């Protein structure tokens, strides 16, 4: 089971690295910029989570996460170089998939350390959104988490369902599936139908 979770985590890192690489392409960055942006997108949220939970940072202990970033970035560069148009829809899709992966992995890790469900949901949301937030700030973009369609809210809902299923006694696999699919489907539906949570009146 732990090995399976490890590979799911590796896949989540690779997906977010693809998202960072595509954003670097959009901003016309050089090779070093690609590596930096792919890395902060992929491991920024998990690093913040581990520092707050006061546990060893995951990629420091296991360098396979770094290898997955480099491989994902390299393959994405090759793919983009052979396609003329910038695949914005793939950037958004990769971001949504990475968001779902990282959310459930953050909740899972927090619960395994014995924190409360509320803290676990916060840690899952932080794991999911912080990498993309750092990416967007570095690119001088308004972070997706702060604008437009539902973003962090999908992590909150997915993480809450994860915790609910966990305390019902469901297996860890089912909890992760429920939380991850809820996050992903909500995010894709929010992008498709522009769901948001407006709190201010918009000017005419």
Image (cartoon, helix red, strand yellow):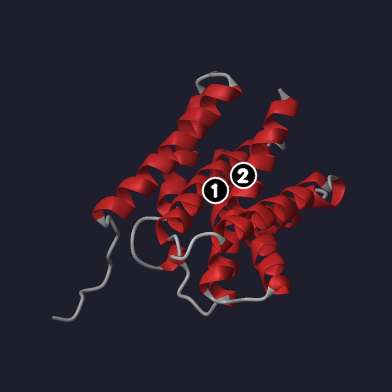
Task: Please rate how many residues cluster around mark 2, counting C-alpha atoms within 10 Å: few if below 14, some from 14 to 19, many from 20.
Answer: many
Q: Is residue 121 above or below residue 180?
A: below
Question: Relative to 146, is 5 on the left or the right?
Answer: right
Q: Is residue 100 above or below residue 195?
A: above
Question: Residue 200: x, y in percent?
Answer: 26, 72
Report how far apart the C-alphas of labels 2 and 1 lie in the structure.
5 Å
Which residue is the site of mark 1? Answer: 98
Residue extending farthest left: 204
Question: Where the N terminus falls, by quadrant?
Answer: top right
Question: Relative to 146, is 139 on the left or the right?
Answer: right
Question: Where the C terminus falls, by quadrant?
Answer: bottom left
Rendered residue at 56%/42% (across/down): 101
Does residue 59 appear anywhere in the picture?
Answer: yes
Q: Earlier in the sequence, mark 2 or mark 1?
A: 2
Find numbered disc 1 in the image and state the secondary structure of the residue it sits on: helix
Does residue 115 appear anywhere in the picture?
Answer: no
> Residue 154 — which label?
none
Question: Relative to 79, is 150 on the left or the right?
Answer: left
Question: Residue 39: x, y in percent?
Answer: 70, 61
132 vs 127, nearest the viewer: 132
Question: Relative to 90, is 15 on the left or the right?
Answer: right
Marks 2 and 1 in Cβ contact (< 8 Å): yes
Find numbered disc 2 in the image and state the secondary structure of the residue it sits on: helix
Question: Residue 6: x, y in percent?
Answer: 72, 34
Residue extending farthest right: 61
Rendered residue at 74%/27% (across/down): 2
Rendered residue at 60%/24% (across/down): 172
Question: Residue 146: x, y in percent?
Answer: 43, 67
Rendered residue at 72%/37% (across/down): 113
Which residue is the site of mark 2? Answer: 12
164 vs 150, nearest the viewer: 150
91 vs 86, nearest the viewer: 86
């Amino acid at each position: 089971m732990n090995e399976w979770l490890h590979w799911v985590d590796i896949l989540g890192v690779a997906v977010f690295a693809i998202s960072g690489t595509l954003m670097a392409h959009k901003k016309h960055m050089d090779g070093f910029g690609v590596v930096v942006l792919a890395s902060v997108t992929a491991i920024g949220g998990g690093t913040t989570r581990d520092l707050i939970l006061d546990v060893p940072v995951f990629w420091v202990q296991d360098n396979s996460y770094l290898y997955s970033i480099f491989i994902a970035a390299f393959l994405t560069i090759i793919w983009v170089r052979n396609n003329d148009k910038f695949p914005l829809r793939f950037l958004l899709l990769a971001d949504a998939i990475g968001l779902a992966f990282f959310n459930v992995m953050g909740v899972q890790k927090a619960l395994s350390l014995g924190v409360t469900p509320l803290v676990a949901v916060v840690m899952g949301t932080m794991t999911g959104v912080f990498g993309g937030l750092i990416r967007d700030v570095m690119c001088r973009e308004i972070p997706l988490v702060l604008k437009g369609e539902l973003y962090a809210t999908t992590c909150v809902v997915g993480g809450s369902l994860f915790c609910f299923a966990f305390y019902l006694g469901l297996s860890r696999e089912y909890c992760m599936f429920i939380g991850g699919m809820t996050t992903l489907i909500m995010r894709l539906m929010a992008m498709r139908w522009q769901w948001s949570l407006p709190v201010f009146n918009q000017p005419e």
